[in-house]
Amino acid sequence: MRYLVITDIHANLEALDVVLADAAVRGYDRTLVLGDIVGYGPDPNAVIERVTGLQPYALVRGNHDKIAFGLDQAEGFNVSARAAAEWTLNALTPAHRDWLINLPKGPTVVDDCVEICHGSPYDEDEYIFDELDARRAIDSARQRLCLFGHTHVAMVFRLAGRSIGFVELTGTRIALDADAKYLVNPGSVGQPRDSDPRAAYAIFDAGTRQLEMYRLEYPIEHTQQKMVTAGLPEPLVRRLAAGR
Ligand code: ZN
């Protein structure tokens, strides 16, 4: 069983299409979507159509998807994020807004090895950046592999015995030990923030216990042009090229 893992697409159609084309070549059986399908980007409706077309095996909502409930969900957002949330709410078709409202809250158990969440398994809106965050998250995870998003930073934590640490992301493939627990963020499809502007995604092969982490170039200028035309905030346009 090969799982395609995508998160934080953020209405970036160009990035999503490049990811889906690459994943199709590599092959996968089931799609897992970890939330933040919309927000920031210029194509919320088209991206929702792509995602529903994939018929995801499991999918959880992100904090930006909750904007479909109303603008009060944007309370903790900064000025740009809030403006983008307002824009998104106006752009969404009624059917897509309903679809977002009905997205399930994580965490969701996928199989006897894998679970997914947006922020962390104990709180969908919590951020996991360091070992301390990871410790709390991994302790509350029900499965050996917990896939998360929200930070837009690709990272892998490994818990063996009581010791937790980062797994260095050097190559694209990581072999997961059967007796360790893992917390994995594939990185963001549509708005990476780890100083690498390329679209990020992962494939987990449950049969071989191999995790594959990929980064792909996509036509960023095209997305940026659409954002300018839509009147989305300038800082959001710039950050795509910076990858932060
Ligand atoms: Zn996000």
Image (spheres, rainbow, N blue to C red):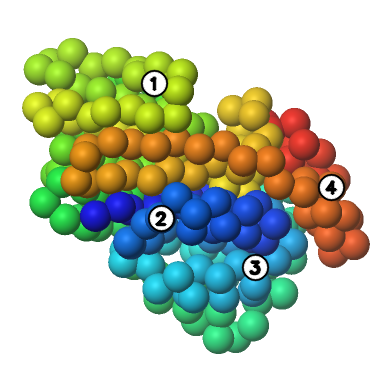
Circle 4 residue: 221
Q: Secondary structure at mark 3?
A: helix
Q: Give the side of residue 207 with respect to residue 61, left or right.
A: left
Q: Give the side of residue 214 with respect to residue 55, left or right.
A: right
Pointer 2 or 4: first along the chain = 2
Pointer 1 or 3: first along the chain = 3
Circle 1 residue: 130
Q: Residue furthest front?
A: 25
Q: Residues within 10 Å of mark 3 (few under 14, many from 20)?
A: many
Circle 3 residue: 44
Closer to us: mark 2 or mark 4?
A: 2
Image point (74%, 62%), residue name: 42
Closer to us: mark 1 or mark 4?
A: 4
Pointer 1 or 2: first along the chain = 2
Q: Is mark 1 within 8 Å of ligand 1?
A: no
Q: Position of residue 109 (x, y in %)?
A: 20, 56
Q: Nearer the viewer, residue 139 or 18?
A: 18
Task: Please name the amino acid that badge 1 sits on.
Answer: Asp
Image point (75%, 31%), residue name: 242
* C-alpha span from label 1 to label 2: 32 Å
Q: Position of residue 230 (x, y in %)?
A: 85, 64
| Quarter of image, res 173 | top left
Q: Secondary structure at mark 2?
A: loop
* C-alpha span from label 2 to label 4: 28 Å
Q: Give the side of residue 98 with respect to residue 55, left or right.
A: right
Task: Please name the amino acid that badge 2 sits on.
Answer: Gly
Pointer 1 or 4: first along the chain = 1
Circle 2 residue: 27
Q: Secondary structure at mark 4?
A: helix
Q: Give the side of residue 166 with respect to residue 177, left or right.
A: right
